[in-house]
Image: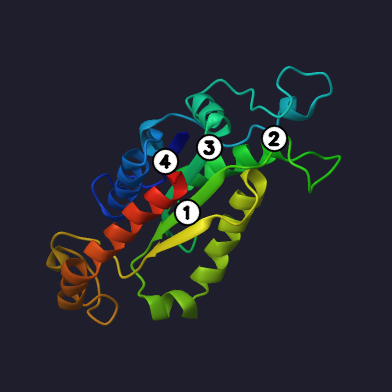
Amino acid sequence: MKAIVINGSPRKGWNTHQMLKKVEEGLEVEGAEVEFVDLYDLRFSGCRSCFACKRKGSACHGVCAWPDDLKPVMESIMASDVVVMGTPIYLGNISAQLNLLWERLMFCCLTYSSYTQPVYPRGKRCAMVVSMGADEMQMRQMGYDRRFSYYGQQLGYTLGDAPARMLWCCDAYQFDDYSKYEISPDRADPVKKQRHREQVFPQELERAYELGRSLAS
């Protein structure tokens, strides 16, 4: 079994990255061959609207033709049995680099002749890891759970047969030292954040590990 885990966060060693590394561990312990990709290490752009992937008789039909660092990543996605993507929430959206991948991947996979039938056969197991500074109540108040579940549905139904499995990392610890940053205690209580980091985040990492195992088993 082949799997690809895609980190859409620029902050290595922090919440999203740590969660995805645990997913990778879970996949590997079940025997999966895992490729881990840090999108912010690569040089690429969004869709160039060249339509090579839509041209009749083209060797690039259904495949992004633009020759940058993202092309082999997209080829690995198509060759994998398991696809896991992770992102922090930035301004209420997925990260910029993941969004660039998203528009190129989704556009290549759809066909103008039938929006309900992607170019590639479905069957991949998909999951998304989403981290945020908001706690669970704030997440629901702002509609993040609904908004990002839509991304999970789009990913899962494009590459697989079901919505992607969603793993939420809420109330994330954002800074080593909160006193260095302009932030209201009402918005982020450092003591509460530290307690969550020590007591809850290890449980979230364990859930990420078990997610990886279940995707590969």
Residue 182 x, y percent position in the rendering: 22, 68
Q: Earlier in the sequence, mark 3 or mark 2?
A: 3
Q: CA distance from mark 2 to mark 1?
A: 20 Å
Which residue is the site of mark 4? 5
Q: Which of 154/26 is in front?
A: 26
Q: State the colouring used for the structure image.
A: rainbow
- Single out the residue that lies furthest toward the right: 113
Q: Quadrant of residue 180?
A: bottom left
SS of the residue under disc 1: strand
The amino acid type found where label 4 is placed reads Val
Which of 31/202 is in front?
A: 31
Residue 150: image x %, image y %?
60, 61
Q: Picture coordinates of residue 81 (x, y %)? A: 53, 37
Q: N-terminal of the two: label 4 or label 2? A: 4
Q: What residue sits right under mark 1 in the picture?
A: 128
Q: Considering only order in the chain, which callout, 4 or 3, is on the residue closer to the N terminus? A: 4
Q: Amino acid at mark 1?
A: Met
Q: Secondary structure at mark 2?
A: loop
Q: Return the disc, 3 or 1, that comes first in the chain's sequence.
A: 3
Q: Which residue is mark 2?
A: 120
Q: Which residue is mark 3?
A: 81
Task: Look at 51% across and 24% down and name the residue there.
Answer: 72
- Nearer to us: label 3 or label 1: 3
